[in-house]
Image (cartoon, helix red, strand yellow):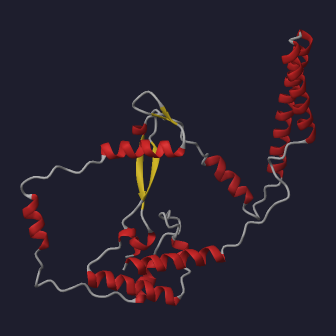
């Protein structure tokens, strides 16, 4: 079962990667530095090195003047770039909508997290470990009591009068896939609803066979039980604290279809 699920996921991923067109490289870049700004940077560094060697007040004055001119030139270059960017926005190629979306939803980087021993988690690995330690303390299983064994024994008793679940058809699986919301975020396999809606008939039949095998064997694949955890900042909470973030779980779309 695990091999069949892994085989289907790999086929979908490879097909999606091969059919995705490469992004065209644009000749115009918004982060290009003008030539006169580069000359000012080179001149300022040379003058600053001279002042560090001589410690002359005249050289210091030249450094301050070049620093002021460089800041003005960078500010003017940014303004010219922004004017050129806004002048080329058109509703035909959806560039105007993309620019508005960026303004409405600005991206914010996660600041360093405070560790218990007055240190800081700065890298992505350190932040991940800090979040994992916090979630392990918050989400702990309930302690066992005397009734747990009785409950487990009650759940393990088969119901003879309950009929087994009926096998699903490929038409039902295809209908469930068409009802997916394409805007839903995928799990760690990056297979979203848009990709599933473009699956051919053979892939639907293979997925239906896997679903019926899961029902017949009463087995749920382990790789479909994993979720990708994203931490969302709580409003009006201090960003350096790990407790100021709430987790959300992104489950795999194929498990939702089942």
Q: Quadrant of residue 44?
A: top right
Residue occupying image coordinates x 39% and y 87%: 209
| Vertical position of residue 150 compared to residue 115: above or below | below
Quarter of the image where one finds residue 71? top right
Q: Residue visible at 33% across and 46% down?
A: 136
Q: 165 or 6: nearer the eye? A: 6
Q: Residue at x 89, y 24 (%)?
A: 66
Q: Is residue 243 above or below residue 150?
A: above
Quadrant location of the N terminus in the rendered image = bottom left
Residue 223: percent from left, percent from top: 39, 69
Horizontal side, residue 160 vs residue 204: left or right: left
- Residue sitting nearer the eye, 72 or 22: 22
**Percent x, y for residue 150?**
7, 63
Residue at the farthest front position: 53
Location of residue 63 with respect to 94 vertically, above or below = above
- Quick one: 221 or 168, which is closer to the camera? 221
Q: Is residue 223 visible?
A: yes
Q: Is residue 178 visible?
A: no
Is residue 242 toward the left or the right of residue 65 in the image? Answer: left
Where is residue 191 shown, x and y percent of the image?
Answer: 52, 70
Q: Quadrant of residue 161?
A: bottom left
Residue, x 51% and y 89% (percent of image)? Answer: 201
In this picture, residue 23 sits left or right of residue 69: left
As drawn, is 38 to the left or to the right of 198?
A: right
């Amino acid at each position: 079962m695990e091999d069949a699920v892994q085989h289907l996921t790999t086929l979908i991923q490879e097909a999606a990667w091969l059919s995705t067109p490469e992004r065209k490289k644009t000749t115009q870049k918004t982060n290009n530095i003008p030539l006169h700004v580069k000359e000012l940077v080179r001149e300022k560094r040379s003058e600053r090195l001279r002042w560090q060697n001589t410690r002359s007040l005249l050289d210091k004055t030249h450094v301050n003047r070049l620093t002021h001119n460089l800041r003005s030139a960078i500010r003017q270059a940014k303004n010219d770039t922004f004017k050129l960017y806004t002048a080329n926005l058109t509703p035909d190629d959806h560039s105007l909508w993309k620019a508005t979306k960026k303004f409405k939803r600005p991206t914010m980087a996660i600041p360093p997290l405070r560790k218990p021993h007055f240190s800081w988690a700065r890298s992505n690995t350190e932040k991940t470990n800090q979040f994992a330690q916090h979630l392990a303390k918050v989400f702990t299983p309930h302690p066992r009591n005397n009734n747990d064994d009785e409950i487990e024994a009650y759940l393990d008793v088969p119901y003879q009068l309950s009929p087994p679940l009926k096998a699903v058809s490929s038409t039902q699986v295809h209908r469930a896939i068409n009802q997916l919301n394409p805007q839903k975020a995928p799990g760690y396999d990056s297979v979203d609803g848009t990709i599933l809606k473009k699956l051919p008939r053979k892939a639907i039949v293979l997925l239906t066979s896997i679903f019926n095998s899961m029902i017949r064997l009463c087995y749920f694949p382990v790789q479909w039980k994993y979720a990708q955890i994203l931490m969302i900042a709580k409003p009006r909470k201090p960003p350096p604290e790990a407790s100021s973030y709430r987790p959300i779980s992104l489950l795999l779309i194929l498990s939702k279809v089942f």
